[in-house]
Amino acid sequence: MSDEIAEKTGTREGDDFIIIDGIRKVYRKDETETVAIDRVDLTIKKGELVSIIGPSGCGKTTILRMVAGLLEPTEGRIVIDGKESKEPGADRGVVFQDFALFPWRTVRRNVEFGLEVAGIPKEERHRRADEYIDLVGLSDFKNAKIYELSGGMKQRVGIARALVNHPDVILMDEPFGALDAQTRNLMQAQLVDILNKTEQTVIFITHSVDEALFLSDHIVMLSKRPSTVKEIIDLPWPRPRDRAAPEYTALRKRILEELEKDNVLYHK
Amino acid sequence: MFKYDENNKYHRFGKTVMIVILSLIMFVELWWILSLLANTNVFPTPAETFDALIEFFENGYSRQSAGSIIWSSLRLFLQGFAIALVVAIPLGLFLGYSKTLNTFVTPMIEVLRPIAPIAWAPVFIYGINYNVGPILVVFIGIFFPLLTNIIFGVKKIDPNLIDAAKTLGANKTQVFTKVMIPSAVPYLMNGIKVGLGVGWMCIVAAEMYSPVSIGVGYCLSSMCQNSLWPSVFAILVIIAILGILTTSVSEYLQKRIAKRMGIE
């Protein structure tokens, strides 16, 4: 089965960790059909961070939700580490834009959630949760309630909660979109730091070109609705990166221009 | 010289307490004036009511002590409340969870809901049982506010929280027990608060119908029939105070639980 996929997508087997194979999403409501995603093919290697960027409303989140198993593609399939994924599960962690933390649980109990539903004993749970709480720098807030935390701290809980399950991939849906500019920069730097330590594979949705340039191994540019992959830009530079580096300037300009071309407002 | 400071929480609290005391004094004053103006046995003054209250606590009524009369009402109330909790909580959770079930059951509920709980009192008391009837009336009174609040609570759950739980590996049962139920708890508490208010009104009315009741509702109707007006007013005061106590306890619990559930 994987040979067949390899042939289809033109890649070698064992090389690609995540294969998004010709997914298409059509929403049907009564007699109207809306094609959200026309066709998207994408392969991601283990340990890579791939950003998906595109004009507003192009279906970035739809793709992420399909990979997470929260939404079923109309056509095509998603294969992660040789397994086709259909239902949501702990092998694909999600970090939500609005954090989606459980407000009635403390920081530690939020991070533990995945281990708890997997039936891991209490001491083991505490140990593993604390490890990731330390990693995101919240050691002093283990027993804090969620409403006591700032936005940046909340999202660090969200990241720790996803990491603790050791998922194959972490799907981040504009994770820093709700944060102010300064916190956002700090969080990006911290994410780079965490990724260097964990070698976690990440799919990252963003509408910020700067964020994509700072974080990604590859930037996937989507066209406007109905979406297709317009271009994949490789960023072979190591992290952490210098935000003001001259090689980004030309790239940033080009991406922004591409995005503007597709912006719906310019076409009306 | 004392100066009021709006930024001092003790000053603000002191101000509120003063206003409340003043309000209550004014209430008693107005009552007194109206009673004197009315100049009838039916409307006793606060002083006469207070004397009757003392007399009630000392001697009780119709061979029952004050304590056993109040406890008799309170027990019916608590029993009705307990049954309402046991029935409304699981039912509300399932009706909130399943859209099909909700669409199916809602018409039945909507037919029954507009019937005043007190309208059931003679039906339950004469039709079923003198002892069980009043409990069922309280049950009806508490049940509907509780049920609608729980259904609302389950429906209001942030869908992101459910998605988060699923992507962390939770199965359907775990989503239900670990996400839906805790999310609905603040709404459940609100339902309890509203339900207790309604339930307390029901018990007094229900007891008036019940030939075997010895509770405050029975005392009220019996005292009226015997023209013991100061005692009637003493009972009204007791009903009011017990009502305030029930509401205060449920409000306090609601606040504590809301805080515990992370909702400020």
Image (tube, coloured by chain):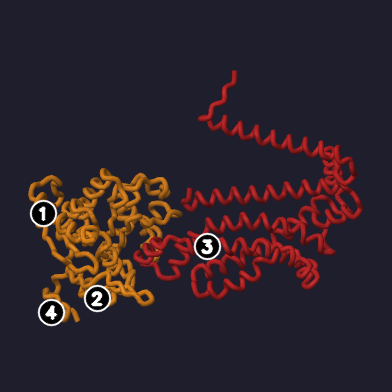
Chain colours: A orange, B red
The secondary element bearing badge 2 is classed as: strand
Mark 1 surroundings within 10 Å by alpha-carbon count, few (fewer than 14), some (14 through 19), many (20 or more): some
The answer to whether dots 2 and 4 both sit on one chain is yes
**4 or 3: mark nearer the eye:** 3
Chain at tag 2 = A
The location of residue B222, given as percent across then percent down, is 87, 56
Q: Are marks 1 and 2 in contact (CB under 8 Å)?
A: no
- Please, is residue A70 above or below residue B215 in the view? below
The secondary element bearing badge 4 is classed as: helix
Q: Seen in the image, is A92 located left or right of residue B242?
A: left
- Please, is residue B12 above or below residue B79 in the view? above
Distance between mark 2 and mark 3 Cα atoms:
37 Å
- In the foreground, B117 or A189: B117
Mark 3 surroundings within 10 Å by alpha-carbon count, few (fewer than 14), some (14 through 19), many (20 or more): some
Q: Quadrant of the C terminus of chain A?
A: bottom left
- In the foreground, B20 or A228: A228
**Residue on which disc 2 sits:** A77
Q: Are marks 2 and 3 in contact (CB under 8 Å)?
A: no
- Badge 4 amino acid: Glu
For residue A251, the mark is: 1
First-in-chain label (1 vs 2): 2
For residue A7, the mark is: 4
The answer to whether any part of residue A118 appears in the image is: no
- Badge 1 amino acid: Leu
Distance between mark 4 and mark 1 Cα atoms:
32 Å
